[in-house]
Image: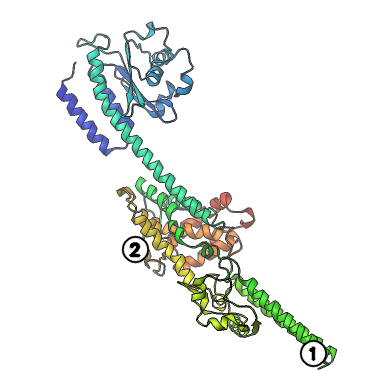
Amino acid sequence: MQNEDSSVLNELLDIILSSVRTKNYTAVIGRIIKLAASTCAAEAGFFYNCNDDKFLNLEYSFNNKLNFDRIGSDNNIYSQGLYLPESRSKETKSAAEISALNNEVINLPAIYNVPELDNSFFANYDSLNNYNSIALLSFPLTNSKGYVIGVVQLINPKDAKGKNISFTKDMIEYIQEICGLAVLILENRKLSEDYGQLLESFIEVLARAIDAKSPYTGAHCQRVPVIARMLATAAVQEENGPLKDFEMSNDDWYALNIASWLHDCGKVTTPEYIVDKATKLETIYNRIHEIRCRFEILRRDAHIDYLKKRLANTASVETLQAEFVAKVKELEDEFALIARCNTGDTPLSDDDIKAMERISQKRFIRYFSRLKGISWAERDHISDKNAADNPGYENLLQNREDHLSEQYNRGELYNLKVRNGTINKEEREKINEHIVVTIDMLKALPFPKELANVVEYAGAHHERVDGKGYPNGLTGDQMSVPAKIMAIADIFEALTANDRPYKEPKKLSQVLTIMREMKNNGHIDPDLYEVFIRSGIYKDYAGQYIDPSQIDDIIPEDYL
């Protein structure tokens, strides 16, 4: 051996330390192979990676005589990759294929003197480089489970005088011992990649499960990452203004991607009938039908009263008919008001509230028991069971004690009086709770140091720059740029979605008008919003993900 053991050991130690500091595994493996080659003064060498798809890919090559190293795709001029399942059926195989398929060491004093081998690779290599490959050592790298994970080949060893020689048994054993370090590095890389893929796959599965939990949330968790990535890219590219110095490291990008996928993971605890609540009276079903039936009863009562008066001749036919028609018209108008207020499409006025309170005082006779067909838990919420069991008068719109269940209030008038949207105070608190649950879930995960920002990015998408958001009331100064990016991405996806039961799909111009107001009233970051508009992210996203019927003409300056 031409190199002293101590110098080889020192070099191995340095390689081990460098492997800890870098993620460029191929370059580290290249150093190991060149070190192994130096022990026998081999002129050239190759490293093939064998992946799970059974492809044998040439990832590294060097030639000391010609003074070059090639990494990755630069080696495609020699080999495009070998698919080992196909190689099995070939009559003539290359040395690399035999080493990989048979876990075999091949030692040839003269490559071209073995006609049963496919030497087209070396013929091509020699022709391209004006080189002469003579002696070859080809051996597999096997992991702790005995699987071939790579192939190393060395060419043209020399003696102390620089004369071509063949690989000896001692040389081969020493070379294989040194290349054992490459096995450890390859296994470490494989484990790292596998765990990374497992984490990302688990995250995507969880996000898709949250979307699938409700037929109305569509692909929210899958689309927010798209918008977040687009806006972050535009922000990084800013050359002027407040964001000109904003940069993101590879770890920041990875953390943002993970956070955007997981930002709503807490929704696994939010009941579907709240997430899907399309109308104010909806729980598991829309209770407007119960109230409609009561109006039907009152109309029928009015018709019966009219017929009784006709039989009794209490007034003229014309008078009684006019009285009946007026009564029906009043009921129709009142039900129309209740039905309109139930949808939550428009904010309620004070007059709407007063009208519903007046309508709620109308009464009808209930003849059937309210205690039958209910659970014991529901029965326990009724204090006056005698009144509930016997016939009696009840209000047209009701807030009953049995409407109170745990933290929820399902009172009919209580829910109908919600001024904006369909969600009442208690349900809103439950929805907001998903952020706290998200943060708690993410804090419980042992994220590596480079993903330490995932919790902050994901947990801040309902914060406001004016400090009026939740759950922590953070101000813009207390939030990172990626966290504020998440807030805008979440809002834009929700506003443009056409699958929400509580709102009709909005035109793009309507969405941007709402977001402009949010920018003006301290809801979202104004600098990022300006980037969002000027860069045309809204337009690029709309072209891919928004229904064409929602896209209208936009003049960007109108929304700045």
Closer to us: 301 or 56? 301
Residue 50 disc label: none
Type of amino acid under label 2: Gln
Can you give x and y, in whole percent of width and height, for residue 224 in the image?
A: 48, 54
Residue 386 vs residue 93: left or right? right
Seen at 73% across and 83% down, the residue is 301
Seen at 70% across and 79% down, the residue is 297
Query: Does dot 2 land on a helix, a strand or a loop?
Result: helix
Q: Looking at the rendering, in which quadrant would you find the N terminus? A: top left
Query: What residue does disc 1 label?
Result: 309
- The answer to whether residue 478 of the structure is visible from this angle is yes
Whether residues under marks 1 and 2 lie with C-beta atoms below 8 angstroms apart, the answer is: no
Query: Does dot 1 land on a helix, a strand or a loop?
Result: helix
Look at discs 1 and 2 and give the one toward the viewer. 1
Can you give x and y, in whole percent of width and height, for residue 536 in the image?
A: 52, 53
Q: Residues within 10 Å of mark 2 (few under 14, many from 20)?
A: few
Residue 478 disc label: 2
Q: Is residue 185 above or below residue 305?
A: above
